[in-house]
Image (cartoon, rainbow, N blue to C red):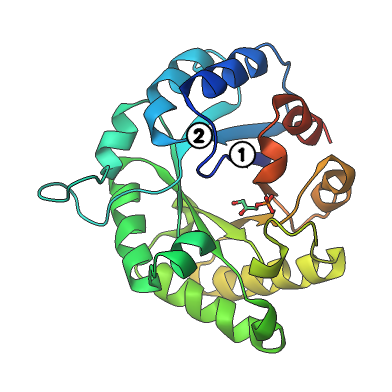
């Protein structure tokens, strides 16, 4: 089965840096058993999609989309606008948006529904803070319940990103990754009779990607810092 390798540039790279990156990356040969999704800043979605659309198993995604279908939302980009650039995926409910911008699971839920309606595949992020480690099962379950209310889980990807592991160099122990992924699968599979696709994110790098990706319950990785250099990211793709 294919494993997803997803790059999240976050708020990094100007236009020229983005184009240098994609012009390097487009020449890399991708393994058949990998699906690569690159999520750059919105202003290059169209450029990226047109460069990689001929590449097999390689797609473009946005890092967020608007909470409304259209209308008076100055500065926002709707799911249909993102879709029209050639993008196929959208990251929603990233912990940086939840914690720095106060995005709630209810808001994430609205965005997820609009993204699915527009034909995008949402990558819905959940994860606990360090101080929530002991009650992480209930924290994660609540985020999932609210973010995915009324959503067909066969149309989405879930990203488990423990917040304390993001950008810190501290990766979650593989046993813990396994535990949480199996927990999410057991909770969502029984309700929907379908096994959800779950990727792990949080300080994934070339040195640990192979071990994480070898876990059966891990369907891929979501990479921040180590995706910013095309050669580093390609090492993860090949892990
Ligand atoms: P890092 O890989 O930099 O820890 O970021 C993870 C992340 O937040 C991806 O969405």
Tell whether 136 sits left or right of 149: right
Q: What SS does tag 2 mark?
A: loop
Query: Looking at the image, which is closer to me, 20 or 80?
Result: 20
Q: How crowded is mark 2: few (under 14 residues within 10 Å), some or many (20 or more)?
A: many
Tell whether 167 sits left or right of 101: right
> Where does residue 213 sit, x and y in percent of width and height?
80, 48
Please tell me which residue is depicted at 49% across the width and 28% down the height of the picture. 14
> Where does residue 10 sit, x and y in percent of width and height?
53, 44
Q: Quadrant of residue 184?
A: bottom right
Q: Do the residues labelled 2 and 1 touch (CB within 8 Å)?
A: yes
**Residue 1 appears in the picture as rendered:** no
Q: What is the quadrant of the C terminus in the image? A: top right
Q: Earlier in the sequence, mark 2 or mark 1?
A: 1
How far, Cα to Cα, is label 2 from label 1?
A: 8 Å
Tell whether 216 sits left or right of 99: right
Please tell me which residue is depicted at 61% across the width and 26% down the height of the picture. 57
Q: What SS does tag 1 mark?
A: strand
Q: Quadrant of residue 7?
A: top right
Residue 40's mark?
A: 2
Q: What is the quadrant of the N terminus in the image? A: top right
Please tell me which residue is depicted at 50% across the width and 14% down the height of the picture. 51
Q: Count the numbered circles shown.
A: 2
Q: How crowded is mark 1: few (under 14 residues within 10 Å), some or many (20 or more)?
A: many
Residue beneath label 1, please? 7
């Amino acid at each position: 089965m294919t494993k997803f390798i997803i790059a999240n540039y976050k708020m990094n790279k100007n236009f020229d840096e983005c184009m240098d990156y994609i012009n390097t990356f487009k020449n890399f040969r991708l393994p058949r058993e990998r699906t690569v999704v690159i999520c750059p800043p919105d202003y290059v979605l169209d450029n990226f999609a047109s460069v990689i659309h001929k590449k097999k198993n390689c797609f473009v995604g946005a890092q967020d989309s608007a909470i409304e279908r259209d209308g008076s939302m100055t500065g926002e980009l709707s799911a249909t606008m993102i879709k029209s650039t050639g993008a196929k995926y959208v990251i929603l409910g990233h912990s940086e948006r939840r914690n720095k911008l106060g995005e709630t699971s209810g808001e994430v839920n609205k965005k997820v529904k609009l993204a699915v309606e527009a034909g995008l595949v949402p990558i819905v992020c959940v994860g606990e803070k360090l101080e929530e480690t002991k009650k992480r099962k209930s924290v994660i379950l609540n985020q999932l319940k609210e973010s995915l209310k009324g959503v067909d889980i066969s149309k989405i990807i879930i990203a488990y990103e423990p917040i304390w592991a993001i950008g810190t160099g501290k990766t979650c122990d593989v046993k813990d990754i396994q535990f949480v992924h199996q927990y999410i699968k057991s909770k969502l599979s029984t309700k929907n009779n379908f096994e959800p696709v779950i990727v792990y994110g949080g300080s994934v790098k070339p040195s640990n990607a192979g071990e994480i990706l070898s876990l059966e319950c891990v369907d891929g990785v979501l990479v921040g810092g180590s995706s910013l250099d095309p050669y580093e990211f390609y090492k993860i793709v090949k892990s």
